[in-house]
Amino acid sequence: MALNNKKQMRMQAAVALAMVLGLVMMSLASAAITCGQVASSLSPCIPYATGSASSMPSSCCSGVRSLNSMARSSSDRQAACRCLKSLAGTIKKLNMGTVSGIPGKCGVSVPFPISMSTDCNKVS
C-alpha cells in the first residue's frame, strides 16, 4: 500500500513539473508528447516536491531538462501542462512553492509564475 502511494505521489509531482516546463518550451519542431513521458521524466522530483527528501536528486534535473527538450511544439507544451495539472491535483503533500523553484534550480528558465491556475490552452 505504501509503495502505491509513493508511485502515485511521484506521478502527481511529475505532472506539476511538466506543467511548468510545458509552458516554457520554445522549440519549433512538432512531436507528440504523452502524459506517460511527462510523468516518467519528472517522477524523480516527487520526493523533493512533497518534502520527503531534503535535497533535490540530480535525476530530477535530468528529467526536467529531458522534458524541456521533448516539449518542442505549442501542442506538446499544452499537453504537458494539462498532464502536470492533472497529476498535481492528485498529490496531497505537493508543495507548489517548492515545485515552482525546481526549474530554476535545474538551470531551466521559466518566464511565468508556476500555478495550478495556469490556462494550458494559452501556453504557446
Image: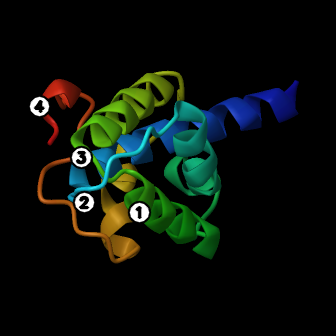
Which dot marks residue 122?
4
Mark 3, secondary structure of its residue: helix
Query: In whole angstroms, how far apart are the C-alphas of marks 4 and 1?
Result: 20 Å
Is the N terminus in the top left, top right, bottom left or bottom right quadrant? Answer: top right
The residues tagged by marks 4 and 2 sit, at their Cα atoms, a distance apart of: 16 Å
Residue plotted at (60% across, 75% down): 58
Asked if residue 46 shows in the view, the reply is no
On the image, which quarter does residue 74 sit in? top left
* Residue pointed to by mark 2: 27
Mark 4 or 3, nearer chain start: 3
Amino acid type of the residue that numbered disc 2 sits on in the rendered structure = Ser
Tell me the kind of residue under disc 1.
Ser
Picture layout, residue 9 above or below residue 62: above
Nearer-the-camera pick, 92 or 29 = 29
Mark 1, other Cα within 10 Å: few <14 / some 14–19 / many ≥20: some
Q: Which is more toward the observer, 122 or 106?
A: 122
Between 26 and 7, the one lying in front of the other is: 26
State the residue in front, 56 or 63: 63
- Which picture quadrant has residue 59? bottom right
Instruction: Indicate which disc residue 38 carries.
Output: none
Q: Which residue is mark 3?
A: 23
Q: Few, some or many C-alpha atoms within 10 Å of disc 4 (few <14, some 14-19, many ≥20)?
A: few
Under circle 2, the secondary element is: loop
Do the residues bearing badges 1 and 2 touch, measured as CB atoms within 8 Å?
yes
Q: Amino acid at mark 4?
A: Lys
List the residue tagged with mark 1: 69
Binning the other alpha carbons within 10 Å of mark 3 as few (below 14), some (14 to 19) or many (20 upward) gives many
Q: Position of residue 41 (x, y in %)?
A: 58, 53
SS assignment at label 4: helix
The kind of secondary structure element at disc 1 is: helix
Q: Quadrant of residue 8?
A: top right
Front of the two marks 4 and 2:
2
